[in-house]
Image: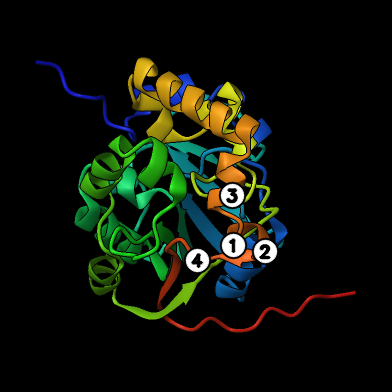
Amino acid sequence: MSSLPSAGSPAVYDRIGLGYREVRRPDPRLAALIHDALDGARTVVNVGAGAGSYEPPDAEVTAVDPSRVMLDQHPGAHRVQAGAENLPFGSGAFDAAMAIMTVHHWSDLHRGIRELRRVARRQVVLTWDPGHERELWLVSEYLPEIRNLDHARFTPVAEVAGSLGAHTVRSFPVPHDFSDGFQAAFWRRPEQYLDPIVRRASSTLAVLPSGVVERAMHRLRGDLASGEWQRRHADLLAEDTADYGYRLLIAGEDLPARTIAG
């Protein structure tokens, strides 16, 4: 009996990475949160860099990713194909290490975190907490298969924070018009999930059996057409943001404030 492929394997991202930047467009509100956490860093390693989202524009960034397809979409000059568990850099090589929605893909979370701590003085990690109480309606009503998959690959935030030695944990409620196609990005725009391009940019949806996903989308399409979805979620339509468990973890040393000339 075969199992689902790992949602974080390089092979999966070599497949879903094509066109990734069309859907996964950095959101300025999340960018501001991440850039504030990286303030003072002159050199940054972005582990699991993908196409380069959320990298600070005023720092020298080295992008690391195991997928060549993802690295080929990265605009930076410093790109290294490698996994988080074996970073090919010396100890203390960077002011800061960033890892944005990637730690759940690593084959050995704690080894990867040790590498972040080894190569950089500060660590900034964005992840999702499987223990968060509020569940996205897409999961509870249409695709409960996501629940088992995500709970198997995401580590509770408390454990990640403990391994990282995080001194700060910040929540990020998702705005209703969030531009980055995270799984929960379209909590108030359900019609977006009907788009196969949007689904392909989600590592979880991309590895679920196509028949399972198509049946769920058929039901969602019907509920939207009949107005049933809108009736069930009238409360959501009145919210501007929704907390679905995304957390930014900050660890390591304070860095000197940057002085911007001009």
Give the mark nearer the N terminus: 2 vs 3. 3
Q: Of the residues tagged 1 and 3, which is closer to the observer?
A: 3
Q: Looking at the image, which residue is at 79% across and 75% down?
A: 260
Q: For marks 1 and 3, give the CA distance.
A: 9 Å
Q: Looking at the image, which residue is at 55% across and 34% down?
A: 223
Whether pointer 1 and pointer 2 mark residues with C-beta atoms closer than 8 Å, the reply is yes
Label 2: few (<14), some or many (≥20) within 10 Å?
few
Q: For marks 2 and 4, give the CA distance.
A: 14 Å
Label 2 amino acid?
Answer: Ala
Q: Give the label on residue 26, or none.
A: none
| Residue highlighted by disc 1 | 235
Whether pointer 2 and pointer 4 mark residues with C-beta atoms closer than 8 Å, the reply is no
Q: Of the residues tagged 4 and 1, which is closer to the observer?
A: 1
Q: For marks 4 and 3, give the CA distance.
A: 21 Å
Give the mark nearer the N terminus: 2 vs 4. 2
Question: What is the secondary structure assignment of the residue under circle 4?
Answer: loop
x and y percent of residue 162 in the render?
24, 74
Give the mark nearer the N terminus: 4 vs 3. 3
| Residue highlighted by disc 4 | 243
Label 3 amino acid?
Answer: Arg
Question: What is the secondary structure assignment of the residue under circle 3?
Answer: helix
Nearer the observer, 158 or 96 = 158
| Residue highlighted by disc 2 | 238
Nearer the observer, 179 or 231 = 231
| Residue highlighted by disc 3 | 231
